[in-house]
Structure formats: structure tokens, C-alpha cells
Amino acid sequence: MQQQVRIALPSKGRMEGETLEFLERCGLRVKKSNPRQYSAIMPAFPNVLVLFQRPRDIPVSIASGDVDLGICGYDTVAEVKANPEYLDQIIIIHEALGYGECALVLAVPDAWQDVQTLVDLRKRLKEGQKLRVATKYTHAVKQFLERNNLSEVKVVYADGALEAAPSIGYADFIADIMSSGTTLRENNLRPLIDGVIVDSQANFIGNRQALRDRSDVFQVTEQMLELFEAHLRAKNQYMIFANMRGETRADIVKRVRSQPDLGGLQYPTIAQLATPEDAGNWWSVSLVVAQNRLFSAIQQIRAVGGSGVVVTPVIYIFDERPIRIQKLADLLKEDMPQ
């Protein structure tokens, strides 16, 4: 029986929906026969088994080798990579999938008007005050505090509604994920000015040993990474097609090049149409333009004689082999015995 490549995806919260939407936009639809099931298939890859896990459990599964690949927020990756137990078993294959943006921050009560920065926290420690911070990211928070000369702050593990910790009294302040900041404000908390521990968004990660030793895992990773890169490169890009009448190709080229937004990714494509002899010379012009320049580009095409303008969103832009694939191959090669 062929060994399956195991991919873990978030099973709850905003990350689950955004991850499934992102994969579908990349042409990697996940098919789950029952909404309550914790496994699924990916029709594009018959040898892939999709497993749904809590976001915080995905990096642990990757590090331990229970799962080969996964998508989760960098905040959870940073927590596991900061744990000496897992050493360096997680490889970040793609660090910026473009969704799930948030930050792990230190947040203090609004009543602490004299505490705006890390320096202010250190002053409280020097004055003899014992401080406790509640968080579920204990390893990442400890590392951050040590780097900033705040190792005397006691890190208290807590899960669930961390925002209540200062008011209940089992911690003085918290370290938790913030996206809009609304939850913190509603609980009379605010982030320190320089209290960002980790900036986070969705990451594509893998188990080092599986990527190094199993060709099937590396092949799936390479293909998924190609699709991710091509889709992200195509984000907010549109393909424009238009027809132009002109005696020669050189005439069309001159008119198109006279406009600032008609350069395309590299150059526009200009090809002669197969028109009847009595229809004159017609040419097709096609180019890619960014969304924020789309209307200007259409006006410019019209200004130089374009008509029948058709616009369609671009799903993929495949370029040369993504540099992340080469970097991954080079990294794994370094692991091989000489």
C-alpha cells in the first residue's frame, strides 16, 4: 500500500475557513464527506490525507513526525520552535501565505498609566514589584522576556479567556494574540508600544526528516509551493485583451508603449488577427495589470485606439522555479551525510 502524505490544517476558528478558501483558490480543494470528520482528501493529490487539528497542535504534530506538512499561524510555530524539546524539526517552507495576520503581544491593564513600554515594566521590577504574565505561549514569551531583561517576570500558563486574568488576580498582565485589538479594549487592556513578541500570519511548514527522506513528501511540497507562489503572484492582477486597428505591428507597438500602464509584466503581447482581406489590419493586444491601475490602463488603451476590451482576473502567474523550492532543496541537502 502506498504511504500517504499527511497534511494538517486548522480545525477551528477563522484560520480554518481562511485556509480552506486559500487552498481552493490555489486549485487545491479539500473534500470532507462529513462536516464533523477530522480527516479529508485533496482530489488534486490522491496520496494526500488531510487531518484537521487545533491550530496550536499542528506544529507539535509536525515536530514530532506524526504529520508531514501543515498550515498554521506563525505564532504557534514560534512557540514550538522555542521549545528545546523539539530542537529543529520544523522547517518553514513558506512564511507569508497572505492571510491570518495577527500578533502575539504583551498587554497591560489600562489602569497602568505609567507603563507604556518594556522600560516601564523593568522600572516596576527594579522597584521590587513581583510581576506575573498569563499566556498559553510560555516558551515564546519566556524567550522574549529574557531578551529584554525581564526574566524576573513569572510566566503563568493559562488557556481560554486570558483577558480576565488581571481582573481575577492570577496574573498582572497577559501575552496573547491580537488582530484588531477589540477584545483587549473591551477588557480594559492595551498592548505595550514595543510589546510585540511575534508578528504572525499563515505559514506552510513541514517535518525536516520527512522532507529529507521521503521523495513523495518533497514532491507534494514542491507542487503545492508552486501553486501557492503562482497564486500569490497573481493576487490583484488582471489580464486585459483588446483589439486595435493599425497598418503595421510597429505602429501598434509605438502606440502601446506611449502609455505608462500598458507595459504588462514584462512586455505586452501583440499579435495580428486572422481578419478577412477587406477588413483591414487588426491586432490583438494582451497584458497583465495590477488592480489599482486597471481603470487607468483601460482608459489608455482606448486613447490609443483599443476597442472590444475584455478583462479577466489572473489566477496563477508561473515564473521561474520559485526560490523557496531551491532554498528548501539546498537546506535538506546540507542534512545529508557526506
Image (cartoon, grey):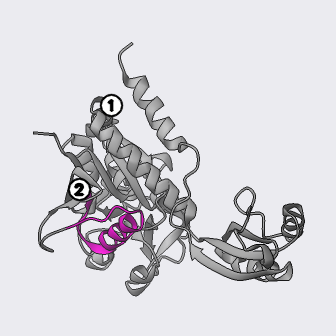
- Three-letter residue code for mark 1: Arg
Q: Residue at image x 48%, y 71%?
A: 191
Separation of disc 1 and disc 2 at Cα?
A: 22 Å
State the residue position of label 2: 57
Task: Look at the image and tell me whether residue 150 can be seen.
Answer: no
Upstream in the sequence, badge 1 or badge 2? Answer: 2
Residue at the far top: name it: 338
Q: Residues within 10 Å of mark 2 (few under 14, many from 20)?
A: some
Instruction: Please tell me which residue lies in front, 172 or 206.
Output: 206
Residue at the far front: name it: 277
Q: Give coordinates of residue 75: x percent, y percent.
A: 39, 58
- Three-letter residue code for mark 2: Asp
SS of the residue at dot 1? helix
Give the image quarter of residue 90: top left
222 horizontally vs 302: left or right:
left
Q: Residue at image x 43%, y 83%?
A: 182
Instruction: Please tell me which residue lies in front, 121 or 128.
Output: 121
Note whether 89 is above or below 193 in the view shown: above
Discs 1/2, front: 1
Residue at the far left: name it: 1
SS of the residue at dot 2? helix
Q: Residue at image x 73%, y 76%?
A: 243
Q: Is residue 20 magenta?
A: yes
Q: Which residues are magenta?
A: 7-31
State the residue position of label 1: 212
Task: Look at the image and tell me whether residue 57 can be seen.
Answer: yes
